Image: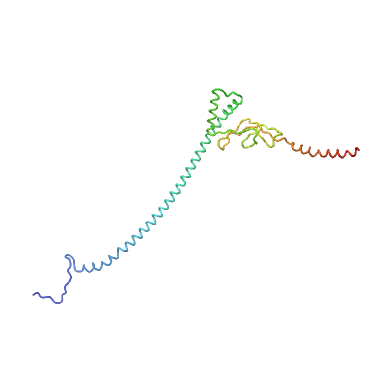
Amino acid sequence: MTEETPGFDEKPDVPSGATPDDAEPQAAASPEEGAAPAGDANAQIAGLTAQLDQSRKALEERTADLQRLQAEFQNYRRRVERDRITVKEIAIANLLTELLPVLDDIGRAREHGELLGGFKSVAESLETVAAKMGLQQFGKEGEPFDPTIHEALMHSYAPDVTETTCVAILQPGYRFGERTIRPARVAVAEPQPGAQTVKAEGTDEAPAAGDDKESGGPDEG
């Protein structure tokens, strides 16, 4: 029989290479290891939330920049298109202005019956092309005189007009769109000055003559 030594208690088994004192710190550290992951998760969530807010703010700023750039680009396109149309209209107007003397010669030839043969065909083709480019002729006899589109070269008085009127078209006017290339050169006539005054005075004098005649009848008798 094996004799037990009095005064010694049995101790738990300790792994080889470790001292008995190592078991107690490991057991004591296990509660702290369970609490540490929860704190780290909260910190990670807070960090991710901050990063998400920053990303959203950056996205909003970039979106606003993109919208501003898009608006500026649209304004630039409209300005370029407007300038392009303006330059085109000016170029066409300058070309048509150079053709006006030729069109005047064609008009005079037509009035004198000299627009014949091949010259007539060429002249009509030129007029057709000018009309397709937007050239419009204006100016007619009998229309009221408008200083914005008419240029008066001759002036006279006429008893049969009630306002300043174009009585002859010396050179037709031309316009391109809303632009007047050349005003119509006309002869104008104004109402005869004093015509209405003379008529009114004659109406007033007639009763006076009648009164004298009536008043003279009894005297003669």
Q: Nearer the viewer, residue 36 or 215?
A: 215
Q: Residue furthest bottom?
A: 6
Q: Answer left or right for 134 relative to 197.
A: left
Q: Answer left or right for 24 relative to 2.
A: right
Q: Quadrant of the N terminus?
A: bottom left
Coordinates of residue 166 in the picture (x, y in percent)? 65, 33
Coordinates of residue 57 in the picture (x, y in percent)? 41, 55
Q: Residue furthest left?
A: 1
Question: In which quadrant of the rendered view does residue 158 lie?
Answer: top right
Coordinates of residue 61 in the picture (x, y in percent)? 42, 52
Question: In which quadrant of the rendered view does residue 39 lie?
Answer: bottom left
Q: How many callouts does the rendering have?
A: 0
Q: Answer left or right for 127 relative to 52.
A: right
Q: Answer left or right for 1 relative to 133.
A: left
Question: In which quadrant of the rendered view does residue 173 lie?
Answer: top right
Q: Nearer the viewer, residue 151 or 23?
A: 151
* Vertical position of residue 15 compared to residue 191: above or below: below
* Vertical position of residue 132 compared to residue 30: above or below: above
Q: Quadrant of the C terminus?
A: top right
* Applied colour scheme: rainbow
Q: Residue furthest right?
A: 221
Coordinates of residue 190 in the picture (x, y in percent)? 69, 35
